[in-house]
Every structure is written in C-alpha cells, then in structure tokens.
Amino acid sequence: MAALDLNAIRAIVEGRLATELAIVPVIPVVFHNVAYTPTPGSTWAQCSVSFSNNNYLTMGSTAGASNSVIGVIVVNIFSAKGVGSGANLTVGKRVRDLYNRIVVSGVRFDPPTGPEVVATPSPEGYFQTQVRMTFETFEDL
C-alpha cells in the first residue's frame, strides 16, 4: 500500500508561492504554524494548506484501489491600512495566476476565488484580502 505523502503535496503548494513572492517586488510569506512579526505598514502574505475531503475512486480492498484527495489553499494578503487596495490586489493577482487551473506534479488546482476583502483583519491594523482555491490529487493504494 503506497499512501500519499501529504508533506510532498504541501511542499508543491508552498514552494510555488515562496518562489513567486521572492520575485521583485519581494513579498514575505508565512506558512502555517510559523511565528511571524510583520513590519508595521508592510505587505506580506500568509498561506495555509488543509486536506479537507477524500473520495473513493474504486471500491473493494486496498489492493489496486484509488482515492481522490481534495485540499484547500488559503492565502491571506496583508497591506497597509488607509492607502487603498491596489498593492493588495496586485499580490492577489500574482497568487491567482500562480495556481489558476494548472496541474503541477499530479496536483490539479481549481480556479481561485478572490481576492476577497476580509472585514475584520487579523492581525489588526492591516487591509486584508483572501485568495482561496481547492486542489485535487490521486492516491493509488
């Protein structure tokens, strides 16, 4: 039985984002469960990857069986408050373009949603939007 390596999938998602946001203009990116103290008034992104749903693709025993593994990527984008949404939406477009309907190493990314404005930013003191997308990959047992 060859179970799917969830960390390999996470590395594909996070690696693409880290590489893109390292291009000028560089945007710091923080990943799930990593401490970060932003510079006041700066633009930065936060990414979390969750595995949310699985489906049987074949029935029966585990020998020769296949599953669909579905996950969600949430990218929160923070920028200075009180100066408009332009910088934030520019980063959101970069994130959308990075994943929009592509397949990378067997991971199929769906069309993104957003960037949507988050009414109550966390942490406070920033303008926040969110880009979300689902992805799917397959597990052969």
Image (cartoon, rainbow, N blue to C red):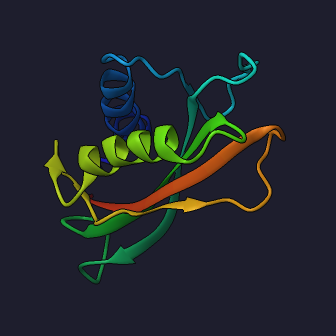
- In the rendered image, residue 18, in percent from the top left (x then y), is placed at 39, 24
Residue occupying image coordinates x 30% and y 68%: 67
Residue occupying image coordinates x 74% and y 21%: 35
Q: Image check: 47 left or right of 55? A: right
**In front here: 27 or 57?**
27
Residue 4 visible in the snapshot: no
Which of the 4 quarters of the picture holds residue 9? top left
Residue located farthest toward the bottom when viewing the structure as drawn: 59
- In the rendered image, residue 49, in percent from the top left (x then y), is placed at 51, 47
**In front here: 53 or 67?**
53
> In the image, is residue 12 above or below residue 61?
above
Residue occupying image coordinates x 58% and y 28%: 43
Residue 32 visible in the snapshot: yes
**In front here: 1 or 45?**
45
Q: Image check: 64 left or right of 43? A: left
> In the image, is residue 30 above or below residue 136?
above
Total numbered badges shown on the rendered structure: 0
Which of the 4 quarters of the picture holds residue 94? top left
- In the rendered image, residue 34, in percent from the top left (x then y), is placed at 68, 24
Residue located farthest toward the right when viewing the structure as drawn: 124
